Image (cartoon, rainbow, N blue to C red):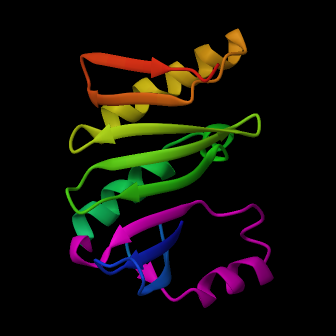
Amino acid sequence: MKVQIYKENGLDSYEAILVDNGELFDPTYEVLLRSEKKLKGNLPYFALPVGEMDKKIQKEVSHIVKNMKKNFRKKISEVILNENKDLTIILSINGGPSSVFIGKDDWSEKVEKLKKIVSYMEKKRKIPAIINLTNSKKVVVKFNE
């Protein structure tokens, strides 16, 4: 994933590459992978506040994305972690955006639910604008008109 690490004001930021083990590498690593033909598609973005840089969180997000099947992973445009450690995922499904609010905890469990919801909605040809999974016992799905 391409990581954009930003400061509180959002004006100052720098980029890195998040690899499978949760480590951050210099952005030139992407160039190297592409030149060796090991990376073909676009990398999703991961926005991370500088104050929340934490190996455990980086590894958890990396693990979640790595365990997604390729066809679902391609739908991810951006993963955002805010200062409150709330996780949000922006999906691009059939050219339209879907905002998915995951919340602070149980990320892996909620992403599994998300995969099922997206699969079901794609079969029904209805793509939600917002999916709220912050409460794992109550899923809220909203559509644009």
Indicate the quadrant containing the N terminus: top left, top right, bottom left or bottom right. Answer: bottom right
Front residue of 42/144: it is 144
Q: Is residue 45 magenta?
A: yes
Magenta segment, which residues?
24-53
Q: Is residue 21 visible?
A: no
Indicate the quadrant containing the C terminus: top left, top right, bottom left or bottom right. Answer: top right
Q: Is residue 44 magenta?
A: yes
> Horizontally, is 32 left or right of 129 in the view?
right
Percent coordinates x, y for residue 143 in the rendering: 57, 20
Q: Is residue 34 visible?
A: yes
Front residue of 31/143: it is 143
Percent coordinates x, y for residue 52 in the rendering: 23, 70
The residue that appears at 53% across and 46% down in the rendered structure is: 90
The residue that appears at 73% across and 70% down in the rendered structure is: 38
Front residue of 129/58: it is 129
The residue that appears at 38% across and 38% down in the rendered structure is: 101
Total number of numbered labels? 0
